[in-house]
Structure formats: structure tokens, C-alpha cells
Image: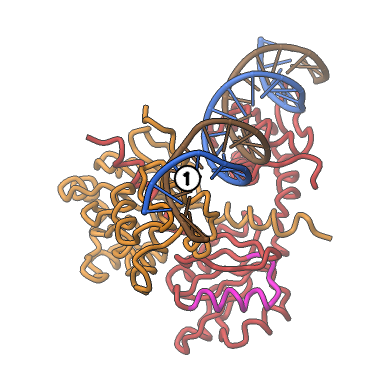
Chain colours: A red, B orange, C brown, D blue
DNA sequence: ATGTGTGAAGAGCTTCACAGCC
DNA sequence: GGCTGTGAAGCTCTTCACACAT
């Protein structure tokens, strides 16, 4: 058991702060920022920001605020944001391509280093400095390259099999875009991004209290 | 105020049940399903399923379970899943294309009916029966077509402006893929799908309790 | 016997208010 | 004055156990 129970939501918000801090650093208007200032950028209440940060230590200075550079480093540590962690994308359809061509990840602490697909016409294509490989060799290749995180961007029908193979290849975490339930051992962290579900939630809240 | 406070999470889970029920209906093995059976498919505990459903009425039969067809209809009603609600995609990059070419949405209760982009080479392209239009005319077109939901799939730099224009065009809800904070009036429901944040969360949980 | 519906207990997260420090 | 750090209160969501229906 950990010393203190850290809310799940806190982790997500830390990343939001992180991104805001990166902006502030670029603007370079000040070396420090108060929870009130941060709250305006992040749309999170000042007290929440302070409590979130306080779970991990006392990073601020009373009467002043938080050192921007220092806080960036602290959050990096906490979230293990580190481009050394290797990520692979499986499935180079539209979603896979979107991920491969998004250049923002590097500023945000991680890098995609491999891509796999099953289609002959896609294998061998280059995206930046990544060449799409044959999914046939998935387990072997991700194991030999030390891939720790897999992104599942294949069609629903292939998702369960690929998920299993990522697990066999030794990844510790999987981010899935497949609109279906996946079964994973507890040793593998699984997050599903379910667009239909988000849409459904939006619908409910937009059209419920209606005339 | 509503009669009972309904957990936010319940809404998301309802959609998960919905999808599972659609599968069960297709399999056509039985007319009914118990919360225990559903729980195995959805990976949600039986008691949670029962409580979630009980917020909206008494849909089950004691000793038997829930009628599959009946429950599908009820959830459709609750979530306002209805292909009559019109959705537009703004930004036909990789993410936009992924959404336009995903055929599953129709089974899941909504339809994308328009697409916009600013790039001359994309405007006029067809995806299924949708022709990409010039984002120039965004407000006018979504208003005249009665678009109620906008999906924001443009680069970060354009996101705040387009968000504002969607709002002006009269949408009631926006689903954004932009990795930045957006400011919207309370009258517009906003959900942000933040992939970097999900990655960061995964990282934290995968590499924290580590050696 | 089987399986739903639900009040009450429990766990988790947020908010508040203010003590403590600059 | 300004701002952080935090215990305690308040709120929300989940879990449990069992009454109730078929």
C-alpha cells in the first residue's frame, strides 16, 4: 500500500498542469506561477491544483507560487514522462497514421518508435523515421526492441488477438481504440478510448434537459 | 433538479451495456439476459449493472433477468441514441478520415452527415456519401442543416477559433481531439479526448510500482 | 431456486477554510 | 499583503446484503 491514496483524476490533471507549464515556460513571462494563475489556464480550481501537487510533496513557496521549471521537472518525474519509454503502434489505418504523424508527443514526454500492419501495401511505408513492419513478427520485434507500451489501432475484429500478442510480447501497457471489451491480465495496464461512448455521453447531456 | 442524481459514470456504462446487448441480439441465443451474464461481457459487476438500470426504472423481471430487445430500446431512449441527430466533422486530416470511414457509428445510434476542411485539395473529396465542404461556410451551413453536434479534428492552432464558430453555428455539443483547453459557454457540452493525457496516465500506473 | 431492486454502509474525491510561511 | 499546504466536512459513486418477485 502507498503512503497516501492518490486520486486517479489527480494523475490526469497533473498532465494538464504539465502542458500548461510548458506553455508558460515558452512564453517566459515569469519564473513562477500561482495556483490561481494556473487555474485560469487549466480550468481547474486553485484548491484542487494545490491539493493535487501536495500529494507528492511541497513544491511551492508560500506567498510566491510554484517555480515553473521546477514544477515541470517534478511532474515529469511523477508521471515518468520520459522519451526513453518505447511505444509501438499496431494498425496503420487512419488512426494509426494520425498518431504517427502527430509531432506533439515528443514535447509531451513519449515517443512512438515502431509501427506494425498486416497489409502488404502498408508494410514498408515510412512515417518520419519509422518504417511500418509486418505484424507477423510483432511479439519477436517488440520484445527485442524493448517496447513497453502498445497502441491498438486495428479493426475491432483483430483487436482481441493483437491485444493478446502485445501482452505476450511483454508490453506493460496498452492503449486501445477498438470499440470492444478486451481481456487483459492485471499485469498489463489497459485503457480504452471509446469514441462512441463519448459521443453517447455527449448526447445524453445535450438532449436530456431539453424542451 | 432531477428526481435522482445519476452518476456520470452510469451514462458511460449504459452505452457499454447497449453495445453488449446488440451483440447478444445478433447471436440470438436467448431473449433475456441476467445482470451476471452481462457482467461477464462488460466487465462490470452485476450489482453495478442493476443499480445503473434502476435509476431509470424497473426494466427486469425477478427470477428471470432483462429482456434483451426491451432493454436495447430503453437504453436508446435514455441516451437519446437516434440517427436523426446530426453530427458534423471539422478537419479532415487523419482523425477526421478515421471518423468518416468508421462504419460502426450507425449501429451505435448516430450519423455523421457533414465534413469541413480549409484545404483546397481536400474540399470536394467524397467519403461515402459525404462531400467535404469549405470551412469558410461553417456557421451558415451547420445552421441551415440543423447540425447539433460538432467533432473538432483540426490542428491545435485552429481549435479555439473553430470551437467558437461551431458554437455560433448553434451546436449543442462538441467532441474535441485538440490537445488544449477550450473555453465554451455552459450551454454547449464539451468533451475532450486527450490522447497524450491517457498515455501519461498509463505511464504512471505502468511504471510506478516498479523496480 | 433464481435473479431483480434498493436502502444503508463504505470508499473515494472535492471543497472549504484557515493556519502557516514568505 | 499574497499564496501554499492541509485537516475536516461534504458530496458522489460503489459495494453489500437482503427483501421481494417469479
Q: Residue at x 25, y 69 (%)?
A: B125
Q: Give the magenta range.
A: A158-173
- In the rendering, at what x and y percent does residue B181 appear? 49, 42
- In the rendering, at what x and y percent does residue A110 appear? 65, 60
Magenta segment: does it hold A169?
yes
| Prevailing SS of the magenta stretch | helix
Residue B179 relative to residue A77: left or right: left
Regarding mark 1 in the picture, which secondary structure is present there? helix
Residue B14 relative to residue A116: left or right: left
Occupied quadrant, residue B112: bottom left
Near-viewer residue (B76 or B132): B76
What chain does badge 1 belong to? B
Q: Which residue is mark 1?
A: B51
Q: Quadrant of the C terminus of chain A?
A: top left
Q: Is residue A138 above or below residue D3?
A: below
Q: Residue at x 30, y 44 (%)?
A: B166
Q: Residue at x 66, y 82 (%)?
A: A139
User: Crowding at label 1, few (<14), some or many (≥20) Cα neighbours within 10 Å?
Assistant: few
Residue A14 relative to residue B6: left or right: right
- In the rendering, at what x and y percent does residue A120 appear? 47, 89
Q: Is residue B50 above or below residue A178?
A: above
- In the rendering, at what x and y percent does residue A13 appear? 60, 42
Q: Kindly tell me whether residue A30 is visible in this rendering.
A: yes
Amino acid at each position: 500500500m502507498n503512503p497516501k491514496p492518490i486520486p486517479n483524476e489527480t494523475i490526469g490533471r497533473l498532465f494538464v498542469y504539465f502542458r500548461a507549464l510548458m506553455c508558460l515556460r515558452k512564453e517566459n513571462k515569469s519564473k513562477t506561477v500561482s495556483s490561481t494563475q494556473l487555474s485560469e489556464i487549466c480550468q481547474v480550481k486553485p484548491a484542487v491544483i494545490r491539493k493535487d501537487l501536495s500529494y507528492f510533496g511541497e513544491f511551492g513557496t508560500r506567498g510566491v507560487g510554484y517555480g515553473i521549471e521546477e514544477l515541470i521537472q517534478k511532474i515529469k518525474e511523477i508521471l515518468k514522462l520520459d522519451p526513453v519509454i518505447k511505444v509501438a503502434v499496431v494498425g496503420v489505418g487512419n488512426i494509426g497514421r494520425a498518431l504517427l504523424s502527430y509531432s506533439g508527443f515528443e514535447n509531451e514526454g513519449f515517443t512512438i518508435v515502431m509501427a506494425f500492419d498486416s497489409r502488404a501495401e502498408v508494410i514498408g511505408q515510412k512515417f518520419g523515421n519509422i518504417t511500418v513492419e509486418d505484424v507477423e513478427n510483432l511479439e519477436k520485434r517488440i520484445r527485442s526492441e524493448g517496447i513497453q507500451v502498445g497502441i491498438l489501432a486495428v479493426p475491432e475484429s483483430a483487436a482481441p488477438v493483437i491485444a493478446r500478442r502485445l501482452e505476450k510480447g511483454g508490453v506493460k501497457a496498452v492503449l486501445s481504440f477498438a470499440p470492444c471489451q478486451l481481456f487483459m491480465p492485471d499485469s498489463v495496464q489497459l485503457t480504452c478510448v471509446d469514441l462512441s461512448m463519448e459521443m453517447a455521453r455527449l448526447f445524453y447531456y445535450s438532449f436530456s434537459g431539453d424542451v
